[in-house]
Amino acid sequence: MQKKLEPGNLLDEYGNLAQAGYALSLVKKYDRDKIQANPFRIKEWDYYLIHNSHFGVALTVDDNSYMGLMSISFLDFDARTERTVSPMTVFPMGKTNLPPDSGYGETKYHDKKCYFSFRVEKGRRVLRAWMKNFEDHEPIRMKIILDKEPEDSMVIATPFEKEKAFYYNQKIIGMRARGVVEYKGRRHYLNPEDSFGLLDWGRGVWTYSNTWYWSAMHGWIDGKVFSFNLGYGFGDTSAASENMLFYDSHAHKLEQVRFHIPGEKEGREQYLKPWYFTSSDDRLDLTFTPVLDRRAYTSAGIILSDQHQVFGHFDGTAVLDDGTELKIHHMLGFAEKVRNKW
């Protein structure tokens, strides 16, 4: 089922995916002008998550055509608290001008209340963000540099059952982070010895209602960076899954993965109790112990968003393509379940 993408255009002459599958880099060329679906269904976003074992920040610039979203989250893993502020814009319709490739250019947005700049420079990514009234009328500001980008990343091109709908996504996991975040009168420092960053880069045309599962983690095993990307539920993944292990900059492909969330079968998910992760190829066996649930619920007319991004520690084993078994001990990451109608 794991079909690799070949270089070429992402969309065919009719606006459908030219090929479904996975790759280790952005081998397909994305061109917004080639989309033939309803322009209100186009969604483009850049999402960065940067953290160490004590705190983290999440940054989003999102152009959903009829609605834009600029978001900053501050995550305090020691205190088990979080703060998220997400101002919205109306009908950006692509005017945010997100780059068509993650490897160059600048994602930028600013107004009187906030400023975001994600610039790709040679060998690194420079992230700057500021928000005027983040908490108690006080601002948050930061400058973060991500480098040591791994050679491989997770790339997937996924169709939906609906014609001309698609999901083109890259997740770069395991980048090293350094920088400073100023928040509530304190400076919080990120150092590359213990701080990591990931990019979730996405472009596509979504259907109205979707539920997805996503998990990522990075840390050190035997002096080398180990990370993973796990997920399912979004679109038709019969051509390929987005499940990958990364060790020492190289990818190792997994088949299907399942998130076992306590209480989910009864419809009463208990997100702060331990989760379990397994894979159909018996190469993944993980326990996830939560410490913080970054949850958000919005319901307004035809728009609904029910999000649980849970941070915690992973323990267990993962097996590389050559059969090497890696032991995972108390490594910080997250797992989420998100249900959206928009």
Image: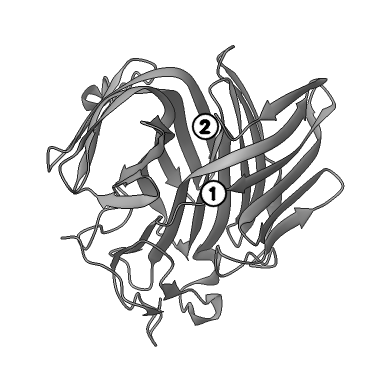
- In the displayed structure, 242 sits above or below 95; it is above
Q: Which residue is mark 1?
A: 148
Dot 1, crowdedness within 10 Å: few (<14), some or many (≥20)?
A: some
Quadrant hosting residue 5: bottom left
Q: What is the residue that sits farthest to the bottom in this orientation? A: 13
Q: Position of residue 294 (x, y in %)?
A: 52, 27
Q: What is the residue that sits farthest to the top in this orientation? A: 79
Q: What is the residue that sits farthest to the right in this orientation? A: 112
Q: Which residue is mark 2?
A: 297
Q: Position of residue 37 (x, y in %)?
A: 46, 74
Q: Position of residue 90 (x, y in %)?
A: 69, 56
Observer-nearest residue: 45 or 288? 288
Residues at marks 1 and 2, CA–CA distance in whole angstroms = 35 Å
Q: Position of residue 61 (x, y in %)?
A: 64, 51
Image check: 131 left or right of 249? Answer: right
Quadrant hosting residue 23: bottom left
Image check: 101 left or right of 132? Answer: left
The type of residue carrying mark 2 is Tyr
On-image quarter of the N terminus: bottom left
Residue pictured at 41% horizontal, 74% vertical: 28
The type of residue carrying mark 1 is Lys
Residue pictured at 58% horizontal, 20% vertical: 54
Observer-nearest residue: 271 or 80? 80
Does residue 126 show up?
yes
Image check: 4 left or right of 105? Answer: left
Q: Are marks 1 and 2 in contact (CB under 8 Å)?
A: no
Image check: 115 left or right of 30? Answer: right
Residue pictured at 37% horizontal, 49% vertical: 210
Viewer-side label of 1, 2: 1
- In the displayed structure, 165 sits above or below 198; it is below
Tag 2 or tag 1, which sits nearer the N-term? 1
